[in-house]
Amino acid sequence: MKRQDYSGVVVTAPVSVPYVRYSRETAHWWIARALKQVLAAAGLKPRDLDGFSVSSFTLFPDTPVGLTQHLGLSPRWLDSIPMGGASGVVALRRAARAVQAGDVDVVACIAGDANRIDSFRQLLSSFSRFAMDASYPYGSGGPNASFALIADAYMAEYGVTREDFGRIAVAQRANALNYPNAIMTSPLTLEQYLAARPISEPFGLYDCVMPCAGAEGFLVMREDEAQARGLAFARISATIERHNAFPEDPVQLRGGWAVDVDELYEMAGCGPGDIDLLQTYDDYPVISMMQFEDLGFCAKGEGARFVRDHDLTIAGDFPHNTSGGQLSAGQAGAAGGYLGLVEAIRQVTGQAGPTQVTSARTAMVSGFGMINYDRGLCSSAAIITGDGR
Amino acid sequence: MTDALIDLARALGDGSVEVVDLTHTLDPDFPVIVLPPEFGQCARFRMEEVSAYDGRGPAWKWHNISMNEHTGTHFDAPIHWVSGKDVANGAVDEIDPSVFVGPVVVIDCSEGAATDDDFELTPEIIHAWEARHGVIPADSWVLMRTDWSKRRGAAYLNMRDDGPHSPGPTPAAIELLLARDIRGFGTETVGTDAGQGTHYSPPYPAHYLLHGAGKFGLQCLRNLDKLPPTGAMLVAPPLKIKGGTGSPLRVLALVPARTAEGERP
Amino acid sequence: MTGALPPPKKKNPQLRQVVPTLPPQMRSRAALGLTAAAARGAFLLQHCAECGAVQYPPRDACSACLSVELDWRETSRDGRVIAETRIHASPDPYYRERLPWRTGLVQLTAGPTVLCHLHGDIGRGDAVRMDLKLDKAGQGVMIALPATRSADMADDGQLRALTAHPKHRRVLITDIRSPVTRPLIEGLFRAGAAQIFVGESESWRRGSDHAAIAALDRVSVLPLDVSDAASVSRLAAEIGGKTDILINTARHVRPGGVLGADTVFAREEFEINALGLMRLAQAFGPAMASRTADGVNSSVAFVNLLSVHALSADPHYGAFSASQAAALSISQTLRAEFRASGLRMINVFAGPTDDEWHQPLPPPKVPAAALARSVVEALCEGLEEVFCGDVARDLEARWRSDPKVLERELSGGGA
């Protein structure tokens, strides 16, 4: 059956709460700050909000239900998206359908996480049952070690070098220097990337994100509602979501996008050549490279050549992760799954400021999340369009 | 107080009577008699701390101890042996306490035992001793000195493939001592019988004959070289164990002090 | 190829001893199946009873057909390394002080991909033999080993962390009179042990191999009476700080049931077999537990020799069986108490041994040399439970199958 389009629904009010490396503040605190800003943008009071979608790893022992009382909300529609790096797109596509069906008028989608000293270790050791049983006890390298294994197999399979990954990281750092909220504020050269201390071979320091605290958010509402409130908005052309794709692959050399990408373009009525900018989920450059392939920008195994042949900076021929991505802006837990989408909304609505890509109208955002054992299980992607004011 | 006790107290006070300790220290590593392994065995002395000024008892230290009745320096009651099982008042708690203090004579066999591990106390030796010191008085303890108590470790039991080898009395010697109507017989070795005493007839004559006659035994004694052949007093009261066949005990001898020349009066 | 591990230098007394830490130790209930297999050296994975699909990581339902009937079965250990990494950064205190650490992905011929520790001799592309071993936290973990054995293979650092290998270690064997002691000394030296202390109680008794054993190079015979707390403490004060492996061979056994036997023998059996273990653990345990991270010759294991009738009584050896059951129970508590240190408690179970106290029993009986081999193997492989000999293995299998049926058979009710 042909999927229904998202006509009449828009996404608006992109908000990024500046990240900090370590913070004593709680996820509740970070989520409240993002929520206050998105509501302020739309002129809404907390009690007027009727839809709320939350992504966070560090709310424990609370759930979004507890947050409603904590934050004084009284929504008729409540969602919890525990999908890590896939959370932003998934929150968007669920909220959009609820708004479209009339179950809710306005949904505030918020992701935020705390980062106390040692909380990352605690998060890793109990991230999932399979991680607890079958990956964390093996060197306790966390996702760095697990993705290093994927990178090792990927490099061997497709003849990719560290320089190829380095090009992605270096371009993102160049972008981040234009993004005022980025945690990383100094330039990065390919030489520095290659000479960085090893973290988990083949990964060095600049293959890895910096865990930090922060929050991101946006609103989903009907187009007429956005217009009435005078909000700049983006339309949703297409979305996809997939979990545990290709379980028979002995090691993850492709993600779930490869299952659903044709449907994504078909629903959007466009192709890879129509995308003005791409925001991938960059927990590691190798995963961004995999997304270039699996989202159809190049053939499988051609990712390395693709990054050699393109300029991935804001002013380049293939603007990618324009706010620096998690590699340079930082990874604020589940907010990392919102970073690209929030930046993409800013871009296609002409609000990106120093990172603005000229005449950006069509953006693709992809998400990837939850390394349960040996691979990331969730993949998602969306194409959004704006009038690029 | 009678004059005799006043005199004794004065003698103990001025050193003209000395107290000699004939007892080995109770120690888990002190040998006990070894029987063929299928028989029940004599338990060694064992001690476990109950508290030592700590959480188990903040201001005091004490131990639980356990052992066989025949562990360390010990007393044999008549009911210890099958021949004495029907002796009246033959258990340690029934014995008339007056017999726990009394005269003692020492027969020195140390020279012979030094060269012969199986040295025997014979009637001839007893007769020779009596020729020098007079007939063994009735109702006195007779101790066989061998200096065996100076041996350590495996040399004490002196176990070989054919069993232990240590000095002891012949059946005839015991018969002679019974004829003298002694109170009891004591040794420095692990038993009152010779190591090879099982090969006599009757086997273990000291145990068999003495206890059958209601006499007592003392073993694992030491310091017998500090006792005169005659003239000393033995103090050997076993613990009052109900139905007990023997008991570890502290054995003391009251001994006239040596003269300046080293001779006893 | 792994080079031979050199003997450790003398310790620098000015440096603080490394405090024991453990790798991550929490596991789901299903994953404890790996621990149970590793404890006895088996390589078991879950197999779906309905469709046969092999599962990993352990789980509660088949990922092919959703059946919840998953059986732990022997599985092929063959596989190939498809990815490798060398970890240089970890937030975990145990691994932080052991970096870098190598792990890899191995595709098993049985199907699943296993994330595992990598032996130093192998890398991506290599055919490997998988093993399940207990790590310092006492949990079963996967390690990929070279498909063919090599001379110094056991010296690999990551493998050695999963075993209790005697190489360069100092061993206390508690009873010189045990028939196992002599072959054990020989086996331990063959495995590379540095020094062996042998305990001797009641040195005034005969029957000790004292002179022959004391004359051996790198062997010291020392007074030790496991029935005497003071004796055990004295020896612990002397060598407790350099006892890396303790093997308790002290044992008292007398035939007889319960009705006809007296409590004197039973008490002696409990004194030596159960309370003796307790005294040894109390005196030597704390020092050993503090030295489990102390370099090449760190303390590593406490080995207990038990009768397999610890599991189910042999009515002809009633009190002895009871003392063995008590010792087994004590060893389980000790295992829990040693857990925080990573000190391994190994139980080696045997059927009737070929000695004077089992003389009337028909064969097969366990020769002392076979028991010694099992002990050394348990150390070299890092096992927690070993059943030595056909009788012990048979009895264990019957016990696992149905303890009540076994009890009835042992009391003569089976045809």
Image (spheres, rainbow, N blue to C red):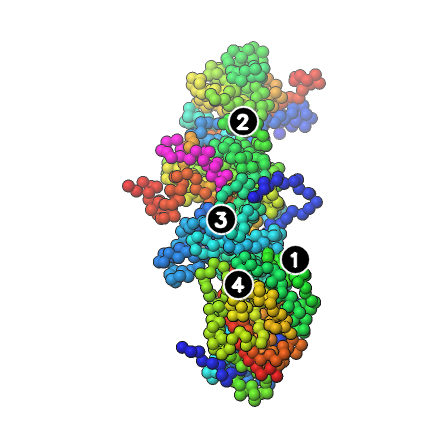
Q: Nearer the viewer, residue B9 or C60?
A: C60
Q: Amino acid at mark 1?
A: Arg
* C364 part of magenta stretch: yes
Q: Amino acid at mark 2?
A: Ala
Task: State the residue position of label 4.
Answer: A301
Depth check, mark 4 against mark 3: the one in front is: 4
How dense is the environment of label 4, judged by Cα within 10 Å: few (below 14), some, or many (20 and up)? many
Same chain for marks 4 and 3?
Answer: no
> Disc 2 marks which residue?
C212
Q: Cα distance, mark 2 to mark 3?
A: 44 Å
Q: Nearer the viewer, residue B67 or C194?
A: C194
Label 1 sits on residue: A197
Looking at the image, is B200 positioned above or below residue B76?
above
Which residue in the protein does label 3 denote? C128
Task: Locate the N terminus of chain B by quadrant.
Answer: top right
Name the spot of residue B74 as percent of width and height, x first.
Answer: 53, 28
Q: Residue at x 64, y 68 (%)?
A: A171
Q: Which residues are magenta?
A: C358-379
Asked if C48 appears above or below A23 in the picture, the reply is above
> Which quarter shows the C terminus of chain B?
top right
Q: Is residue A371 visible?
A: no
In the picture, measured across the screen, residue A26 lies left or right of residue A299, that is: right
Q: Quadrant of residue C320?
A: top left
